[in-house]
Image: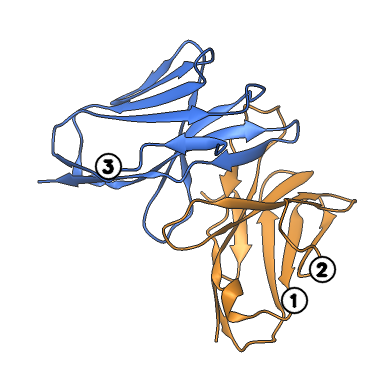
Chain colours: A blue, B orange
Amino acid sequence: RKEVEQDPGPFNVPEGATVAFNCTYSNSASQSFFWYRQDCRKEPKLLMSVYSSGNEDGRFTAQLNRASQYISLLIRDSKLSDSATYLCVVNRGSQGNLIFGKGTKLSVKP
Amino acid sequence: GAVVSQHPSWVICKSGTSVKIECRSLDFQATTMFWYRQFPKQSLMLMATSNEGSKATYEQGVEKDKFLINHASLTLSTLTVTSAHPEDSSFYICSASRRGGLRQPQHFGDGTRLSIL
């Protein structure tokens, strides 16, 4: 089983749609969780950290379920500029090694 | 602005050449930096953890004699791809995080596109 698994995608949605990404992780000792976005041929950029109580940043809402080892990202009112690959990222180990999911590609169409 | 600088951003060279990539934390000290590799349409794969003043920790399957890592100062880590071959062509990215525990997000360099002819 892969350490971090995500929806395979791609997701093709119209502007204004709500889209949800799911992610599961296998290491129950993982302590930190993040969503990054990566534009084509660019480095990943942090979108948001994910906290146990769930957290929201504008149109983006992240949820964490430790019991199920499940992470989600909800994007409301999708914009064209949201088109990117979204990476579920989990830490592994005390040094902070990040393990990346394969990513889910989102294309928001006019 | 950028907090992690990576250089060069693009390298094209002949097979057999050794290539050095630099990763610098610009406004903070990083005792630990990470090196990743990403092949087209694949996820980022952690190659190694670079530890200031000590040997790097390599992930399983990564040849330490092929990918030499040096972390001589708190702001600089280098990755040298020795005797590079076409199969080493990839996108190499470094990252570092500020001190403050595991919840500190990692900041990534811009990445280096390595093309071996």
Q: Residue furthest left?
A: A110
Residue B75 percent location from the top left of the image: 75, 52
- Write down the residue under mark 1: B82
- Name the amino acid type tagged 3: Asp
Residue A70 percent location from the top left of the image: 46, 22
Q: Quadrant of the C terminus of chain B?
A: bottom right
Judge depth for marks 1 and 3 and give the one in front.
Answer: 1
Say above or below: B18 vs B61. Answer: below
Q: Residues within 10 Å of mark 2 (few under 14, many from 20)?
A: few
Residue toward you, A45 or B68: B68
- Name the amino acid type tagged 2: Asp
Can you tell which quarter of the image residue A71 is in?
top left
Residue A22 percent location from the top left of the image: 38, 29
Q: Residues within 10 Å of mark 1 (few under 14, many from 20)?
A: some
Say above or below: A63 vs B5. Answer: above
User: Decide: marks 1, 2 in contact (CB < 8 A)?
Assistant: yes
**Dot placed on the residue nearer the N-terminal end, 1 or 2:** 2
Q: Is residue B48 left or right of residue A47?
A: right
Identify the disc placed on residue A19. Answer: none
